[in-house]
Amino acid sequence: MSNANSSESYLLLVEFVHKHLDFHDAELQSILDMHGIVVGTDCHFLPLPNSDTDTTADGDRGSFQNHSTTSKSKSNSNKRPFRILSFAWKSIGSKYAVCDEDPDSDAASPTRNGGSNDTVNLITALARCTLVRSVMELWGAGPSIDDCATSIRMGSSLRRHREGRHLRRRNIGNTKQNDSTPIKPYPERTWKITIHTLGSTYTRQEQNEMRSKFSFLQFPGPVQMKHPDDEYLFIREVELDAMGGAVYPRHCKGDDGKTKKELIPENDARPPLACYFGRVLGNGTLGRNWRGSNRLFRYSLKKRTYLGPTSMDSELSLIMTNLAQVRKGSFAFDPFVGTGSILLAAALRGARAFGTDIDLRVLRGRSSTENIVSNFKQYDLPPPELVRSDNSIYQRHFRKHLPLFDAIVTDPPYGIRAGARKSGSRRGDGEARPIAEEFRYDHVAQTRPYAVSDVMADLLNVAAMTLVMGGRLTYVIPSMLDFDAEEDLPRHDCLRVVSVCYQPLQTELGRRTVTMEKVKDYDERRREEYLEGTWVNGPQSAEKVANIRERLMEAARKKPGYEEKAAWRKQKRKETKEAKKRAKLEGVGRVAVDSECRHANDDDGRD
Amino acid sequence: MRLLTHNFLKSNVKGTENGYPLNIEVTTINCEESPLDKLFLLNLLPKVNYPALRTAVQQISQHCVPPLPEIPEQLDVSDKESNQNLDHETLKNLHRVLFDVYLIEGWLVCPDTGRKFPVKEGIPNMILHEDEI
């Protein structure tokens, strides 16, 4: 930490979970921005120890645009799961708080229009990041445990902690700025030191040796293993591979995978990548493993009553709401609402939800107890507004209105698991057969295929039209290997790209979560111009997205063993059909082979 | 369907320019009280077409048990300042008519062509038949 001005700065170490690697920075950046924390002004990113290989710690440059092509996405697996955030010391305890608060309360996010005079609680703010595993007050860091201990000695973190001024909770509603609830005095605070060794295991004795390096801190209070007042954390970072395991593992697996693992001396002797020591934040309310207490599990798809093959996994939905900066009081819109998973995530953030879809069956759900509204009821949320409409003609369904939505969060139909439709006749000549009056009441309106390139063009245009200034559109777009994020993403003159995050799904296929922000007012006179300018490379880029289904099937057909697999699947389908038939005849009722739910699990994405 | 949504919907039948606001025919209507969401309401008000809201309230009021509260005859909602100064009672009533009333079954009728858009299970179906596009 040689360049950290330690007496002036307050440092936080953020640890990410080993998932959705390409989303880490974009989500963090989005949350900081949402709380009015400007990187480069209010805080800075500092490089990690041994960071010459780390290309992401950009120091002050707060731009985290991830234009990941496949070559870059491979190197993402070498991205380190830590970030160091530096705040001006004098802002802690005044502008920013780091004390434990009710996890359900808002972190006083400033409104878009003006600054807020409320203190922003950094813990509550960062807890919103789905991909953050823990946050700690960084006392020392270095390329070895001894360097780490030295840097603590050189810094002032211990002294500050003894004084504890920044830890006091501000009284809400208190007019006097300096008044605050006192915290437990330093000599009485219980404590413990947790050892966190990435990708390796150490014996208890080895861990205690590490602990002893920090005994110079001489904490006066008693050690307490469960729920201490202060949990200190020593982290030993090593290089991790794509799966989150150590590149140079300390032990090799025993022959049967169970017996005591043998030490690999060369690996064991390797120095760590970095060592960090600090005090865990949010301990009282969130615990060290925030993800568990992030209540994600409660929102898991497994517990949801209404699911379909296109339901977005809850984790990605929540990340999308963060990228789109959905907050309490937001008006969130999903033009392709489907089973409502993403809208649900938005509502969980406190937004009012509005969803449209052209597919009436999916809107209505399977029954009165299995539909979008019942999903909302399950989580005690006010029901969403739902309209059956066609997004390709949004302006014909809705009157001209002032920009309405703060966030548009959606997973558009791109024809892989569900074909996109728009209103109109299926007949090739475009002429529709007139419907006799007596049949009109029961007539089911025909819909016709809706090219993916048009889906995207219309989506961006509706976003430009209906988003408030500064509002965000976050959507998912599938892409195969030849997709170039720079050239092939759809564009709109009123929207600028904030981030692009890549998620690999299969060997050939991945998907990108794109976030755009409205930066220019929409001009209706330029509608045609906007729509035509969507695809920079014209038909080429549009094609890349449009034909994914066909190309996937092509690629699958070429794979060895395809014939057998296809035959086996056909056989299975036949068997299921016959079983259903038999069950019906025997009057058993509906056989619970719900193939629709087969795909909907938390790691959704496989076709 | 809440009156909030109705305020933005219009008829998209080919050829009509005056498809707003839609007239409401009630078959089944529900009322479910919810706490006043002041933050959201104040944010929303400048975007609401107030005369259309008042007309809608009048059209459905007779079907509501208990009857809907009175909202001011005229209101300039475009001024954010004056919206903030509205008294609590008015805000509560506006919240109630915008958020707490649900049309479950009924029709939305185009004032120009008379085309009826069905509302079933609370979801308005605005899709035109293929010969109406």
Image: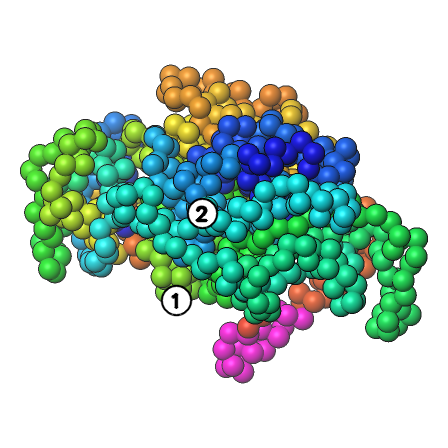
| Quadrant hosting residue A518 | top left
Question: From the viewer's perspective, is residue A37 above or below residue A493?
Answer: below
User: Which residue is more in the foreground, A589 or A54?
Assistant: A54
Instruction: Kindly identify the amino acid type of the residue bearing the numbered disc 2.
Output: Arg
Mark count: 2
Q: Secondary structure at mark 2?
A: helix
Q: Is residue B96 magenta?
A: no
Instruction: Nearest to the eye among marks 1 and 2: give it.
Output: 2
User: Magenta stretch?
Assistant: A575-591
Q: Which residue is mark 1?
A: A369
Instruction: Kindly identify the amino acid type of the residue bearing the numbered disc 1.
Output: Thr
Q: Secondary structure at mark 1?
A: loop
Q: Position of residue A295 (x, y in %)?
A: 50, 60
Q: Residue at x 76, y 49 (%)?
A: A145
Q: Main secondary structure of the magenta part?
A: helix
Query: Residue A165 — which label?
Result: 2
Q: Is residue A288 left or right of residue A544?
A: left
Mark 1 or mark 2: name the one nearer the start of the chain: 2
Q: Is residue A283 left or right of residue B121?
A: right
Q: CA distance from mark 1 to mark 2?
A: 53 Å
Q: Is residue B28 left or right of residue A418?
A: left
Q: Residue at x 32, y 55 (%)?
A: A382
Q: Position of residue A514 (x, y in %)?
A: 56, 36
Q: Are marks 1 and 2 in contact (CB under 8 Å)?
A: no
Q: Residues within 10 Å of mark 2 (few under 14, many from 20)?
A: some
